[in-house]
Image (spheres, rainbow, N blue to C red):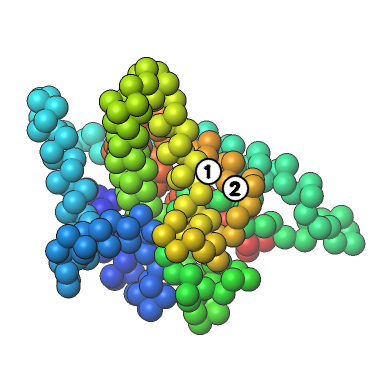
Amino acid sequence: MPFILLYEYGTFRINTDVLNQSQIRVVAFVWLQNFLESVGFHGKFAWAAPPLAVIVILLSLQITSRKQWTFWTYDYGLMIIECVLLAIPLIVLTLLLSTIGSRYLPKNTDGNTVAVQAWSVPTCSSVDGNQNMDSSNGARNIYGNARPWLANIVTGIGAGIYEELVFRLILICVLMVLFQDIFKMTHINAVVLSVLISAALFSAHHHFDFFSGRPNEVDPFDITEFAFRTIAGIYFAILYAIRGFGITAGTHAFYNIIAETIRVSFSTQ
């Protein structure tokens, strides 16, 4: 709930000239919004429908699980700490990839790396806004200015919510039904195949628009980024199976927040 509120508030109130005029929204959010519009939710309610859909889905899962309802406000603090700690392995992995990749970046006359490329610290956040982006720099808006750190943080939080909803909660469930119930595969094989396919699709959607088939100019394909995000997708799937949606979405969001902060610090050096 805090992340849902932060994402919606941030989208409409924080740097609205960048977020709205550039039409930058999390791709998974746009997919969910388009689907809800196709089934009859139109106008302003279409903007409120995706977060309401998340709440309804989670409440439905809670009710059907028949588990005891318990709410403790101090759990939020513990969950924040857990999510930050669980994001650290991905940060270590991406910094390792950055170190390896920097060996192949161009050097200047004094032997220092000329620049740290965008893929060196990739976020797990796919945004919709190709038509207004400068393909030479995916972090730039229609005015030619770098997107503010805070705007990227907002989209990173939204990605944590809606990408986990689409690729873990929904997609893995659908794939499990397909492989286990329809194709009659063993449970273990169905789980492994579902996790691998969902992770690969999760990674690919950062680089390609599945519906139009065009490449994402904001985030051009890079094999290192694709491999990293596939590993991240597997990691998030394991977290989802062990700790549930809330911790997984929080870990995803906090990884984006930390990664974006690192990217900004690199770009200012």
Instruction: Please state if 149 lies on the left or on the right of 56 as rendered.
Output: right
Residue 108 numbered mark, or none: none
Identify the residue under disc 1: 229
Pointers 1 and 2 in contact (CB under 8 A)?
Answer: yes
Kind of residue sitting beneath label 2: Glu
Using the image as rendered, state which of residue 162 and residue 263 is in the foreground. 162
Instruction: Please state if 169 lies on the left or on the right of 126 as rendered.
Output: left
Position of residue 155 measured from the top left corner of the image (x, y, whole percent): 39, 59
| Image quadrant assignment for residue 110 | bottom right
Instruction: Please state if 43 lies on the left or on the right of 222 as rendered.
Output: left
Q: Secondary structure at mark 2?
A: helix
51 up-or-down from 139: above or below = above
Residue 225 numbered mark, or none: 2
Q: Residue at x 49, y 79 (%)?
A: 142
**Residue neighbourhood size for the residue with mark 2, other residues' Cα within 10 Å, grouped as few (<14), some (14–19), many (≥20):** many
Position of residue 66 measured from the top left corner of the image (x, y, whole percent): 9, 25
Kind of residue sitting beneath label 1: Arg
| Image quadrant assignment for residue 244 | top left
**Residue neighbourhood size for the residue with mark 1, other residues' Cα within 10 Å, grouped as few (<14), some (14–19), many (≥20):** many
Using the image as rendered, state which of residue 38 and residue 17 is in the foreground. 38
**Residue 5, visible in the rendered structure:** no
**Residue 162, visible in the rendered structure:** yes
48 up-or-down from 205: above or below = below
Q: Residue at x 39, y 40 (%)?
A: 251
Residue ranking furthest to the bottom: 143
Position of residue 130 measured from the top left corner of the image (x, y, whole percent): 48, 70
Q: Residue at x 24, y 50 (%)?
A: 2
Using the image as rendered, state which of residue 91 and residue 187 is in the foreground. 187
Q: Residue at x 39, y 24 (%)?
A: 190
Alpha-carbon span between mark 1 and mark 2: 6 Å
Name the image quarter holding the C terminus: bottom right
Q: Give the tally of numbered discs.
A: 2
